[in-house]
């Protein structure tokens, strides 16, 4: 029988609703990041760089683009005869068809897949964080301590601790207690949602808790292990880690890539980030263009001026256009004479000529102020914006819009313009 020491299960089913229109047609882990990557490339590359060559990717919400992106895992060197990468959508069973209802339920539904590798350890990851981490070092820590469950934690500012699952440990880093989003936290070690389980322990916990509605690691599996006296340890991680779950954190994480000395470096030889690359021509920067402190993806043509921005692959920026502090994703075209300020523009968008994005005073978004804020303009994929219109801040536009959608050619700050059928 095949035996793998450690296999990884990567949870990539998230809808990512706090990313608004960016995830209306695509799962969060498949959202473009850093000019040429998708969010899921980071945990997948971590696996390969850590010597983990068997990864089950659990998909659910809008999985199509994710499935096409991962394919058989060639970019990550995960196209193996034994192991490799396997996309695991929820499937029909003879008795009933079940969506994955919670993080641990998704793992529970794939017990047979895991059993087929007869692993000693199972690494559980989520597909929507940006970080570099050597899981092998975490596994060494797990073994040295005789742990049955190791939870990766990172110190967070005390005032933010109530947003996380918090671990309380003794001097040996053994977890004595944990609190899910405590009002008055007693520690600042936040769970990163990265776990290593002994396979026997994980299987026992999943089978014992299988009947729980929306079976979840934080709420059910880990408390079960703790109550049953399994040794739980906290592995402290002090590298760069970002949850890009909101539009502002997504925007910030992209902007941090272009810092003079980026905290998160995409260019390190020894820790490559792998992705599926299209066969694109090199980028073209015209004689009249200006590009400062920006990432420009392959196949893009820049005829305007780009400052402090992350531009994806196959993007065209027209003459006389000025783009600042923005993220423009793959295959988007921006006409001539435009002004783009602090915008997040999704893939395959067409912006006409003389369009101004991100102008005027800020106002709270009328439909979802908790999503569209921080002065950003968010444009959903395949959106069309007609010539000569202006769009304010904290706005969202999605769909094939026409001049009739912009009274006096202006969409005021805080407005939501989402065309039906989108």
Image (spheres, rainbow, N blue to C red):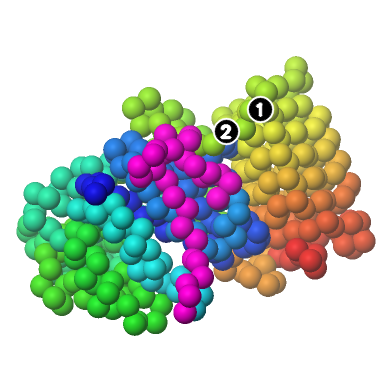
Mark 1 Cα-neighbour bin, 10 Å: few <14, some 14–19, many ≥20: few
Where are the magenta residues, as a range?
Answer: 67-95
Question: Label 2, on which residue?
Answer: 277
Residue 200 place in picture, x, y as percent: 19, 63
User: Height in image: 200 above or below 346?
Assistant: below
Residue 289 place in picture, x, y as percent: 73, 24
Question: Does the stretch in magenta take in 90?
Answer: yes
User: Height in image: 268 above or below 414?
Assistant: above
At 24% from the left and 53% from the top, the residue drawn is 119
Give the quadrant of the C terminus: bottom right
Question: Label 1, on which residue?
Answer: 280
Q: Are marks 2 and 1 in contact (CB under 8 Å)?
A: yes
What label does residue 181 carry, if any? none
338 or 192: nearer the viewer: 192
Residue 337 in the figure: left or right of residue 48 = right
384 or 95: nearer the viewer: 95
At 29% from the left and 39% from the top, the residue drawn is 50
User: Height in image: 299 above or below 158?
Assistant: above
At 35% from the left and 38% from the top, the residue drawn is 48
Question: Does the stretch in magenta take in 344?
Answer: no
> Rounded to the nearest whole Å, what is the CA distance between mark 2 and mark 1?
8 Å
Residue 350 place in picture, x, y as percent: 79, 45
20 or 23: nearer the viewer: 23
Quadrant of residue 183 within the rendered picture: bottom left
At 29% from the left and 52% from the top, the residue drawn is 117
User: Height in image: 319 above or below 210?
Assistant: above
């Amino acid at each position: 029988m095949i035996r793998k020491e450690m296999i990884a299960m990567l949870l990539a089913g998230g809808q990512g609703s706090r990313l608004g229109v960016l995830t209306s047609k695509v799962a969060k882990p498949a959202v473009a990041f850093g000019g040429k990557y998708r969010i899921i490339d980071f945990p997948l590359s971590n696996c390969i760089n850590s010597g983990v060559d068997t990864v089950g990717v659990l998909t659910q919400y809008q999985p199509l683009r994710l499935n096409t992106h991962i394919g058989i895992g060639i970019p990550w060197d995960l196209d193996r005869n034994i192991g490799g990468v396997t996309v695991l959508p929820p499937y029909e069973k003879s008795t009933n068809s079940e969506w994955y209802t919670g993080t641990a339920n998704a793992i529970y539904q794939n017990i047979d897949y895991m059993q087929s590798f007869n692993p000693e350890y199972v690494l559980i990851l989520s597909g929507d964080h940006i970080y570099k981490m050597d899981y092998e070092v975490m596994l060494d820590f797990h073994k040295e301590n005789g742990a049955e469950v190791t939870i990766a934690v990172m110190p967070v500012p005390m005032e933010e601790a109530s947003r996380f699952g918090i671990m309380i440990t003794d001097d040996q880093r053994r977890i004595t207690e944990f609190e899910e989003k405590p009002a008055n936290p007693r520690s600042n070690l936040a769970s990163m949602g990265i776990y290593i389980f002994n396979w026997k322990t994980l299987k026992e916990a999943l089978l014992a808790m299988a009947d729980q509605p929306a079976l979840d690691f934080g709420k059910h599996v880990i408390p079960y292990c703790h109550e049953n006296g399994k040794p739980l340890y906290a592995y402290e991680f002090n590298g760069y880690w970002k949850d890009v779950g909101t539009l502002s954190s997504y925007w910030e994480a992209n902007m941090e890539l272009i810092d003079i000395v980026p905290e998160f470096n995409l260019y390190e030889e020894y820790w490559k980030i792998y992705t599926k690359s299209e066969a694109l021509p090199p980028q073209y920067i015209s004689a009249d263009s200006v590009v400062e402190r920006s990432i420009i993806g392959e196949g893009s043509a820049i005829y305007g001026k780009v400052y402090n921005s992350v531009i994806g692959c196959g993007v065209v920026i027209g003459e006389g256009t000025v783009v600042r502090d923005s993220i423009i994703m793959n295959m988007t075209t921006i006409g001539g004479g435009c002004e783009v300020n602090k915008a997040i523009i999704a893939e395959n968008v067409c912006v006409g000529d003389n369009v101004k994005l991100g102008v005027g005073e800020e106002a709270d978004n009328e439909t979802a102020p908790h999503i569209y804020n921080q002065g950003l303009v968010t444009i959903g994929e395949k959106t069309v914006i007609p010539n000569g219109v202006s769009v304010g801040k904290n706005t969202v536009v999605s769909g094939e819009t026409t001049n009739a959608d912009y009274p006096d050619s202006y969409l005021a700050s805080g407005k939501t313009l989402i065309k039906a059928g989108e």
